[in-house]
Every structure is written in structure tokens, then in C-alpha cells.
Amino acid sequence: MSVLVTGGCGYLGSHTCLALLEAGYEVVAVDNLCNSSRESLKRVSELTGQPFKLYECDVRNGMQLMQVVEQNNVEAVIHFAALKSVSESFEKPLEYYENNVGGTLTLLRVMALQKVPYLVFSSSATVYGEQEVQPVHESAALRPCSPYGRTKVTCEEMIEAAARANPDFSAVILRYFNPVGAHESGRIGEAPQGEPSNLLPRLTRAAAGSLPPLVIAGDDFPTPDGTGLRDYVHVCDIAQGHVAALEALERRPSGVLTCNLGAGRPVSVRELIDTFERATGVSVPCRVGPRREGDLAACWADITRARQELGWSPLRTMEEACRDAWNWQSQNPFGYDGPVL
Ligand code: NAD
Ligand code: UD1
């Protein structure tokens, strides 16, 4: 099967391209490189020994997207391409709607015109917002609390409407919790443009000395050790979830299936720091600071549905995620753009 991966050069896209190639899929990637580098997919080709096509293309460019789909006989799309910073989405909400909603709309129209039957869509746990009941089940009422989160809800709604109107189109919506880590080779990993805001990339850079000591954002949450609880899941398990989603689409080709992808277990900021230090033998300079505005005390996934419907389970431990993140950071202190150590 020929699979189009939008946002293929990004963090999740590059790991998923690798997993797809290893599973025997043909891969075609598109990316406008607004938050990534071509180098990631060059390395995926090296790791798998399989060359594949990358088009520098914006998903909002319907004409170009049509050509890519047509020329490559695309049968399924995995749609990662989006802007993903919660804080930036408050500053530039219209850019987020234009890119995330506009891009998904264009893609859905191209898929309808070209009769591409299967879509896997990247959604986020951020659609849930604050929930009293943990772990969070897919049936929870959606309460996104940022423009970014609202773009994801809007995209989910568009996909559901498109599937209702067209019995030959089906989709799996994946709501990722906190993807972390890197491929075990240390050749691909998370390399955002600019300073990262997520915990593990900040932690590895603080450990490497390229960022100031890590600030634990609050230790007065109503959690066992006072720090925030999240559901960290290895990026290679997330990548495998996409292979499982494609297989599920081939088995049950109608409607929309929405699944959480997480480890299904809460980990506190302090626990993550301890695990990292144990797994790598490297100490993390850190201090306690104030809470980040709008931060949730706790959020973790009920992954029963992904287990049952996709036959997917996370296989890698938090220790492995920490070791792999550190391996990536140590070998590529400047991401894809600097010298490899
Ligand atoms: P990323 O920024 O590394 O990857 C996104 C890729 O899409 C980048 O390569 C970027 O250049 C590209 N892109 C953005 N807009 C584009 C456009 N209009 N046309 C073509 N390419 C475009 O992000 P990621 O972490 O790999 O996330 C992938 C997806 O998963 C996103 O949709 C994100 O919202 C979602 N998600 C990510 C996380 C996470 O923690 N990484 C969590 C939940 C959901
Ligand atoms: C953020 C995004 C969410 C996205 C997720 C994964 C927000 C509000 N939400 O969530 O949409 O899906 O990333 O990419 O931004 N922390 C520190 N110090 C730091 C950074 C983080 O203590 O320097 C703590 C936070 O308080 C939190 C935990 O680490 O408890 C995880 O933070 P982060 O990696 O930013 O992820 P989320 O807050 O879950």
C-alpha cells in the first residue's frame, strides 16, 4: 500500500515513516519544512536502506497535493502536518486555524476527489482539557482550552462529517498523550526549531548544559509528590500505533475510530527526573519554580480501546525512553543542523 505521510520530516512523522517502511509500506512524504529538516528523512532512508520520495509541499496547496496523490497512487494518508505549540496558538490563533484546519480541509477535499479511502489523523490529548475522571476515556466530553486544541477538535469534526457523508471513506483519529524519546539508533529524534517547551527535551538540554537548570513547574499540585502527572509514551510505540491504525482501516473500512495513544500510566515530573538519572547515570540540574499558566495537575490515558480495536500496546519502558532521548541529545546536540558527535 502506498501511504502519504504529511509532516513526514517532523518528530512523529519521521519515526512513523521508519516504522511504515519496516512494515513493508511504500511511503511518500510531504512537508513544508516550517518546523523540521529534510535531514530527518535522509536518515530514515539510511536506517532502512530504502529511498523514498519527499515533496517540499504545503498541505494547503491543493493543486500540488493533488499531483502528489495522483502520481504516487496514494491509498492512505497519515496527516501529521500541523502547528503544535499551545502557547504560540494564543499569540497567533488565525495562523493555527489556517494551517491546521485549512490544511486538513484541503487534504480532505483532495482525498475525496482522488477517492483515497483511508486517513489516520494526528489529534492530541489536549482536546480533553481538564477532566475529573482519570484515566481519560475517548468518550469524555471535549474541553480544549487553547486555540491549538480547538483546531484539533474542529479537524476531528470535519473528518467525522466527511466519513458520514461518504461510506467509502474511513478514518482513525489518534489522540496522543505525551510522546517522548527517540529512535534507539540516536539518528532521529525531536528537533524543534527554537527552544523546546516540553519537559523531556528541556530536561535533556538542561542535563547537557545547553539550557539553564530545569524548572519544575510547580510542586503544589494535588498529586502524590506535588508535581504534575502526565502520560509519557515512547515515540516508537506511537509510530507503531500508526501501522496498527492502517491495518485496522483495512479490516474495518467504514466510519471513524478514535483512540487514545499513551502508556496508560501517570508519571510525575519528579519521577521522570529520577528515571532519567537512573537510566543514564547523568544528573539533571533542577529547581522548583511556579506553575505554568493553565497547566493541568494530571492527565493520563485509558488505552483499553487502542488495545482492543487496534491490537496495539506500548512496549517500551520509561527508562528506554529516557536513555533514547539522551542518546539522541548526546549525538546531536544541535539537532539535525549541527555536527554529529
Ligand atoms: P512537528 O512540528 O515535529 O511535525 C509537524 C511537521 O509538519 C513539521 O515537519 C512541519 O514542518 C510540518 N508542517 C506544518 N505545517 C505544514 C503545512 N501546512 N504543510 C506541510 N507541512 C507542514 O510535530 P510533531 O511533534 O511531529 O507532531 C505531529 C502531529 O502530532 C501534529 O499534528 C501535532 O499537533 C500532533 N501531536 C503532537 C504531540 C507531540 O507531543 N509531539 C502531541 C499530540 C499531538
Ligand atoms: C503540552 C501541551 C499539549 C501537548 C503536550 C505534548 C500545553 C498546555 N499542553 O502538554 O497540548 O499535547 O505538551 O506535546 O502546553 N514541566 C516542567 N518544567 C518544564 C516543562 C514542563 O515541570 O520546563 C511539567 C509540566 O508542568 C507538566 C509536565 O512537565 O506537568 C509535562 O509538560 P509538557 O511536556 O509541556 O506537556 P503537557 O503539559 O502535558
Image (cartoon, rainbow, N blue to C red):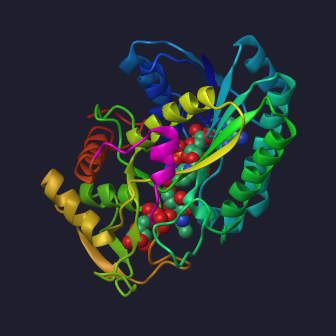
**Residue in view at x 45 percent, y 34 percent:** 15
Q: Is residue 108 left or right of residue 6?
A: right
Q: Is residue 36 above or below residue 3?
A: below
Q: Residue at x 51, y 75 (%)?
A: 133
- Taking depth in this image into account, of 161 and 184 the one nearest to the observer is 161
The quadrant of the picture occupied by the N terminus is top right
Residue 101 can be seen, yes or no: yes
Residue 165 picture location, percent across and down: 87, 40
Residue 339, located in which quarter of the rendered image? top left
Q: Nearer the viewer, residue 145 or 118?
A: 118
Residue 47 x, y percent position in the rendering: 36, 20
The x and y percentages for residue 8 are 57, 32
Q: Which residues are magenta?
A: 300-316
Q: Position of residue 5 (x, y in %)?
A: 61, 29
Image quarter of residue 222: bottom left
Q: Is residue 192 visible?
A: no
Vertical comparison of 222 with 19: above or below: below
Is residue 256 on the magenta stretch?
A: no
At 81% across and 23% down in the image, what residue appears?
115
Q: Nearer the viewer, residue 231 or 48?
A: 231
Residue at 34% of width from left, 31% of height from top?
187
Considering the image in quadrants, where does the C terminus appear?
top left
